């Protein structure tokens, strides 16, 4: 309790120093009533569009299920097709358990790793650039998985372009291969070390040599400020989660373009990445 009281006392000066926006300020607009009016209007407009859409274009219904005939392809509901698409690139326990678990864990730790007082109670971009970009890219990538699984996957879950007919079934002639354990460990090790160390090493080595005002100088200053605001522990957690998110499209590119089935394959412990 004493530690909690000291923490609250330490936060009071920060809260008191923050400028509270008032109505009429040039760069602010109060959440209530102005911003909430916009939110409510957008909600009502979206509801009306969906209502009219459902009346004019009824949802297609498939025939009754036949236990003697399995549909090909068998697709999950659209909101789960992204997870089904991940099964092409990862083992089921990774695609269905580990990766969704990392997404939920990342969302749960946000209040504990993002302790910056800047932007609290405000809706703006400049105080949360990194968070906005990461969340936006993650959302776009998730819907990209849904688009690929729902539109571009046909019978036997083969790739079909929109102009290709599903009546002509394709046979998979692609011979996939997995990397050796040594190659896989080296790749994952280098990927992790470079991902964690580059944002720290670049400002240290290139920052003093960069010309003032150049793009490289601004990048180095931004990376250095990014690390200093977070500290080593929070920086490590954020970067590991970010590297895990970036690793998914990298694995997809390796599979689709280079027929790499697994980067690291250890059957003894059922570890196939």
Image: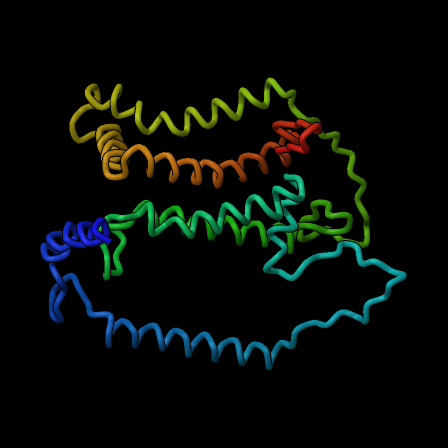
* Residue 53, horizontal then vertical, whole percent: 56, 76
Q: Is residue 248 above or below residue 27?
A: above
Q: Is residue 65 above or below residue 118?
A: below
* Residue 15, horizontal then vertical, whole percent: 14, 56
Quadrant for the N terminus, please: bottom left
At horizontal 43% and vertical 24% (from top left) the residue drawn is: 193
On screen, residue 254 versus residue 124, left or right, reads right
Quadrant for the C terminus, please: top right
Is the image coloured rainbow, by chain, by secondary structure, or in one colour?
A: rainbow
- The answer to whether any part of residue 259 appears in the image is no
At horizontal 66% and vertical 73% (from top left) the residue drawn is: 59
> Residue 257 versus residue 95: which sits nearer the camera?
95
At horizontal 19% and vertical 21% (from top left) the residue drawn is: 208
On screen, residue 18 versus residue 106, left or right, reads left
> Residue 55 versus residue 222: which sits nearer the camera?
222
> Residue 7 versus residue 39: which sits nearer the camera?
7
Q: Is residue 9 above or below residue 246?
A: below
Number of callouts = 0
In the orientation shown, which residue stands out farthest toward the front? 2
- The answer to whether any part of residue 36 appears in the image is yes
On screen, residue 36 versus residue 170, left or right, reads left
Quadrant assignment, res 158: top right
> Residue 211 versus residue 240: which sits nearer the camera?
240
* Residue 267, horizontal then vertical, whole percent: 70, 29
On screen, residue 226 versus residue 157, left or right, reads left
At horizontal 65% and vertical 77% (from top left) the residue drawn is: 58
* Residue 123, horizontal then vertical, whole percent: 26, 60
Q: Is residue 195 above or below residue 149?
A: above
């Amino acid at each position: 309790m004493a530690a909690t009281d000291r923490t609250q006392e330490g936060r009071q000066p920060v809260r008191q120093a923050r400028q509270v926006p008032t109505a009429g300020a040039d760069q602010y607009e109060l959440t209530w009533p102005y911003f909430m009016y916009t939110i409510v209007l957008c909600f009502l407009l979206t509801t009306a569009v969906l209502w009219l859409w459902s009346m004019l274009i009824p949802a297609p219904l498939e025939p009754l299920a036949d236990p003697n005939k399995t549909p090909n392809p068998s697709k999950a509901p659209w909101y789960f097709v992204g997870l089904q698409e991940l099964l092409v690139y990862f083992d089921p326990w990774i695609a269905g358990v580990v990766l969704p678990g990392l997404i939920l864990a990342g969302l749960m730790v946000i209040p504990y790793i993002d302790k910056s007082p800047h932007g609290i109670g405000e809706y703006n971009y400049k105080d949360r650039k990194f968070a906005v970009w990461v969340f936006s890219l993650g959302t776009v990538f998730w819907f990209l998985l849904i688009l690929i699984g729902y539109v571009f996957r046909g019978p036997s879950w083969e790739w079909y372009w929109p102009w290709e007919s599903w009546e002509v079934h394709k046979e998979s002639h692609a011979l996939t291969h997995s990397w050796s354990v040594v190659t896989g460990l080296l790749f994952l090790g280098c990927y992790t070390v470079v991902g964690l160390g580059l944002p720290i090493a670049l400002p240290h080595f290139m920052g003093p040599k960069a010309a003032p005002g150049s793009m490289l100088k601004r990048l180095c200053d931004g990376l250095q400020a990014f690390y200093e605001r977070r500290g080593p522990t929070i920086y490590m957690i954020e970067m590991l989660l970010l590297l895990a998110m970036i690793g998914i499209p990298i694995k997809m590119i390796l599979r689709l373009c280079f027929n790499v089935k697994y980067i690291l394959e250890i059957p003894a412990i059922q570890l196939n990445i």
